[in-house]
Image: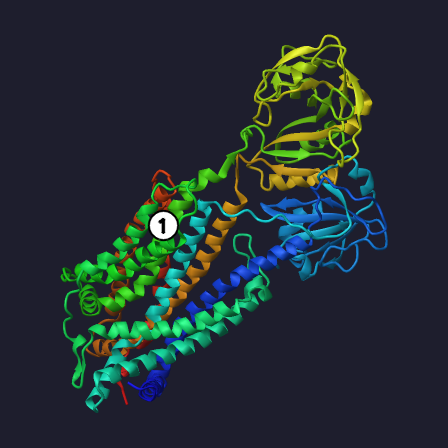
Amino acid sequence: MNVRQWTRDLGMGTRFAFTGRGGWVRALLTAVGVGLGVALLLITTAIPNALDARDDRGSARSDSLYSPEKPARSDATALVADVSTYFRDEEVRGRALEPEGPRAPLPPGLSAFPGDGELVVSPALERLLNSDEGALLRERLPGRITGTVGRAGLIGPSELLFYRGADGLAERIATSENTVNRVERFGDPDPFPSEPLDPVLLLLVLVMLVALLMPVAVFIAAAVRFGGERRDRRLAALRLVGSDGAMTRRVAAGEALAGAALGVLFGAGFFLAGRQIVGSFEVFGVSVFPGDLDPSPALAALVALAVPAAAVLVTLFALRGVVIEPLGVVRTAKPARRRLWWRLLVPLAGLGMLVPMIGQGRDNGDFNQYLVIGGVMLLLVGITALLPWVVEAVVARMGAGSVSWQLAVRRLQLSGGTAARTVNGIAVAVAGAIALQMLFAGVESDYETPTGTDVARVQMQVDLPAGTEPDPAAERFRRTKGVRTVHSLSDGNVGDRAKDPEVTTALTVADCATLRQVAKLPSCREGDVFAVHGAEYDTETPKLARTGRELYIDPKTYDGGPPSRQVAWTLPKGMKRAEADKGLSGNEWGGFLATPSALPKAALPALVGRVYLGLDRSVPDAEELVRNTAAAVDPYSTAWTWQSVERSERFDSIRNGLFVGASCVLALIGASLLVSQLEQLRERRNLLSALVAFGTRRRTLGLSVLWQTALPIALGLALACAVGLALGAVLLRMTDTAVRVDWPSVLAMTGIGGAVVVAVTLLSLPPLVRLMRPEGLRTE
């Protein structure tokens, strides 16, 4: 066949796609369905660029607070202090700024330094502070707002960020190694190279990408088959006027190509429109600027070419079992029973690709990426192959029931494949979600580290700047609403020499009541000093615990750090022995314990005050009230909430990425199902009108449509659970993790899928009522 003949036939199919009102409606429905999938694919290709842009802006504003190197003061330096806080579990990044000369560097996004007591805030933080919801936070951030941070200084439009003008930070830099720094520039010129993902995290990323993109591909494949029955009748008319079978298939390919090409244009439009409003949303703490969602040109071109090509292939594949003759379409008769054997080969081939990696774990190198992607894809594609057979096998045995039930069952018996195509996408999405949830739940403990803290006794800790007395601060916390218990102490280090000591250990200063919370004391009164014995990992205290020995509080242990305030301290006579115990932090406390009067007064500036708080959780916003009190005690204090475990940031970021992607796919599922439902109702318009004209009640027809949706969905979700559990079990064995089914999560994933279908069904009821009119029989 020459190119000219192909071009002519494809052109004829394109004209058919846009001929008449019915053709335009069918083309628009196809374009919307395909366009939604294309838009999500474009967003997927744009996400890496958006994340890179966030990282670049975050790196550009880096102030190296935790670097041991402190540059000398000059007219081109600025002082920066960390004054970040949290508000209802959301981080509020804050920096106090003090320029030391006219050439002091400005952070990105600022046009000038804020004056002492002035604030420059991000737009999102300004909205929060001006709202009733942000009243508690406003108490913590006193000062006049004089400007907003520009885009160059924000990692996302929803970031909560402020810069505050300050004075006297130079005095704090000597006693605050990690929260105040002098900088010559902002930005990290030599960022540390990121470590590669360990094999299990890489496996999570690969499976997540396949599981999120497969439903999109399935929906696109279903969308290009909208109006399949009407198309086949048109092709039969072509056969009647003399075209052969090959020509009719080329015409069908041209029609599908036209709808898919229009869908690509719609997808680009949906993407551009959605990108403009994306900055208004924050999903699981992640927000991006619209301009950051810039897909790679190569990947965008691949999507634009692959979608129409896939539409043509899907159409030709769908026509393989349809005999289009001049007198009609053979498919309108009872179809031959579907064969099961080849449908089982697809998921079995997927398992065959994954099984060789069982037991590999994270210690035997990376998992083979091609086998992982191929195996997961085949398992999920296996759902689309098995579901039509399952629907046909089940509904073939149904019959008895109400009129609405019989109408639904008979329709499914005649066109079960169409119903299965509608359900395929959500079944694939649920199966992938179940497998991912099992994998995340199974390996989660590997990325969690117990902190050892006793969260039953203490829920919050406040670290005070050096030199701030903890006892007056503790009294203010006792008067704070929502605080149940308060324990305050000061701690630091002691060594055998003022500089470069050979032996160092910890020093804790508090009253007797608090010291009894730290270790086992024989007896205690003001003026006592204790040497703790038996603490795990503490081998230094016994070497120093000799009466009359001179020790140095806050010895200088390395060059380049902040100036220390060495204070000589002689161990008194009558020093007592204490036994190590699980202290307030949940860990064994070692070193020396002392009551306040046992130390020289000059030791206070060399110690750091800490307050441990037990909260009354029944008081609303108890944590926010504590943070407000901490800011009132000293604006440079740090209040933080204790957690029983710490989780890997990379693991959390991958999980957040899953939640963001799943939210987008869920939105696509709902929109695509609604479009598919409307298309099916349009196809049945004449049939519904005929039934109404013969006296069928609208309630009966409505229930029949509901049953036609509910039965395939129930079968699809059951199949999705089986495949998802199998895939999850194989992935867990690949990571050398015991197989454990998180049934609440499985039921939740299944319930979400069912809820989406219920919502789509409810939304389709109004157009269904409009179609159930006898006037629908009118035709041209």
On the question of residue 752 being in view, the answer is no
Direction from residue 469 to residue 417 in the image, left or right: left
Per the image, the residue denoted by label 1 is 434
In the picture, measured across the screen, residue 749 lies left or right of residue 415, that is: right
Q: In the displayed structure, would residue 237 be above or below residue 448?
A: below
Kind of residue indicated by mark 1: Ile
Q: Please identify the quarter of the rendering in which residue 640 is found.
A: top right
Q: Answer with left or right where residue 513 lies relative to residue 1.
A: right
Say which element carries label 1.
Answer: helix
Q: Say if 530 sits above or below 57 in the image.
A: above
Which x, y percent locates residue 757?
A: 34, 61
Relative to the observer, which residue lies in front, 334 or 481? 334
Quadrant where the image shows the C terminus: bottom left
Q: Position of residue 562 (x, y in %)?
A: 77, 35
Locate the N terminus and report the quarter of the image it occupies: bottom left
In the figure, residue 511 lies in which quadrant? top right
Q: Quick check: 256 left or right of 121?
A: left
Count of numbered marks = 1
10 Å crowding of disc 1: few (<14), some (14-19), many (20+): many
Q: Nearer the viewer, residue 612 or 55?
A: 55
| Residue found at the far bottom of this picture | 241
Which of the colour schemes (rainbow, by chain, secondary structure, one colour) is used? rainbow
- In the rendered image, residue 364, in percent from the top left (x then y), is placed at 41, 41
Q: Is residue 55 above or below residue 83?
A: below
Residue reaching furthest to the top: 574
Which one is in front, 524 or 360? 360
- The residue drawn where x is 23% and y is 57% is 345
Kindly tell me whether residue 144 is visible in this rendering.
Answer: yes
- Percent from the top left, x then y, of residue 469? 76, 29
